[in-house]
Image: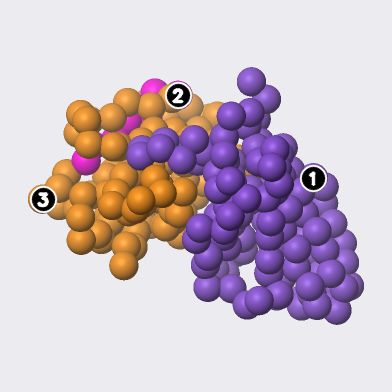
Chain colours: A orange, B purple
């Protein structure tokens, strides 16, 4: 069974500082990995995905994530935080071997990011 | 292209009642999935439909059911509502190809009193 662990349910950073949100996965085979962001009263918006091409994945809004197989990690980073980055972030994993693509995602518990002015 | 549309956005129901939620996927997407989001349990997979067939089902009681129509639109139904069913219900659609991501709607906020 797959699982995702997000370390830190709450993270606070100053505006302009580095953002680092941690995600570790457990999967018996190389998975598909995703980061989503959720703003209040909205659904989830895809930030980026890893599907076995480059291990460093660039997403929207200046975010990127690096797939590290040896560490089973897929941490999300952004060099300089902006006030508009305040939201909840979810890491998700999917079974690459599924015959039906990756429609069933297993989500982490989320990390709420607060930006300090 | 229009995104995933969920209706209604908010619902208030009483224990014991039933409710139907609707989801219109992105044009061309044949897979529709449903997730329940609560503060205590987080995001949990309910079920997934492709070409009107349920392909995957999460660990929810039989009170939770769904269907998909020939135009890929989907509905989910919850019967005999319980207080614990209060949640944000999210619908997502995808192209159902390896690596294709889920695109989520803004959800339906269900409150059971």
How packed is label 1: few (under 14 Cα within 10 Å), some, or many (20 or more)?
some
Q: Nearer the viewer, mark 1 or mark 2?
A: 1
- Given residues A85 and A33, the one toward you in this image is A33
| Above or below for A55 versus A92 | above
Please report contact status of discs 1 and 2: CB closer than 8 Å, yes or no. no
Q: Which mark is residue A61?
A: 2
**Left or right: B91 with respect to A81?**
right
- Magenta-drawn segment: A61-67
Give SS at disc 3: helix
Give SS at disc 2: helix
Task: Classify the position of the N terminus of chain B by image quarter.
Answer: top right
Query: Residue drawn at (39%, 45%), measured in percent from left and top?
Result: A101
Q: Position of residue A104 (x, y in %)?
A: 45, 54
Q: Which mark is residue A70?
A: 3
Q: Position of residue A50 (x, y in %)?
A: 30, 37
Q: CA gap, disc 1 to disc 2?
A: 28 Å
- Given residues A100 and B101, the one toward you in this image is A100
Does the magenta run of residues contain B74?
Answer: no
Give SS at disc 1: strand
Q: CA gap, disc 3 to disc 1?
A: 43 Å
* Residue A54 visible in image: yes
Please report contact status of discs 3 and 1: CB closer than 8 Å, yes or no. no
Q: Which residue is mark 1?
A: B7
How packed is label 3: few (under 14 Cα within 10 Å), some, or many (20 or more)?
few
């Amino acid at each position: 069974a797959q699982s995702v662990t997000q370390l830190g349910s709450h993270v606070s950073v100053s505006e302009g500082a580095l953002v680092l949100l941690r995600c570790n996965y457990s999967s018996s085979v190389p998975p598909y990995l995703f980061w989503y962001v959720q703003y209040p009263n909205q659904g989830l918006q895809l930030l980026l995905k890893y599907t076995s091409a480059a291990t460093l994945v660039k997403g929207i809004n200046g975010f990127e994530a690096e797939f590290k197989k040896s560490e089973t990690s897929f941490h999300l980073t952004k060099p300089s935080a902006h006030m508009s980055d305040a939201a909840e972030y979810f890491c998700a994993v999917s079974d690459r071997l599924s015959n039906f693509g990756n429609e069933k995602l297993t989500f982490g518990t989320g990390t709420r990011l607060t930006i300090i002015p | 292209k229009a995104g995933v549309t969920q209706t209604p956005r908010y619902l208030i129901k009483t224990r014991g009642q039933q409710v139907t939620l609707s989801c219109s996927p992105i044009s061309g997407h044949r897979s529709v999935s449903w997730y329940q989001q609560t503060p205590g349990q987080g995001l949990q997979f309910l079920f997934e439909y492709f070409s009107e067939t349920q392909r995957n089902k999460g660990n929810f009681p039989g009170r939770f059911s769904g269907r998909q129509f020939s135009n890929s639109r989907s509905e989910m139904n919850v019967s005999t509502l319980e207080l614990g069913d209060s949640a944000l219900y999210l619908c997502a659609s995808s192209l159902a190809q390896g690596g294709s991501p889920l695109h989520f709607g803004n959800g339906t906020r269900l409150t059971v009193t």
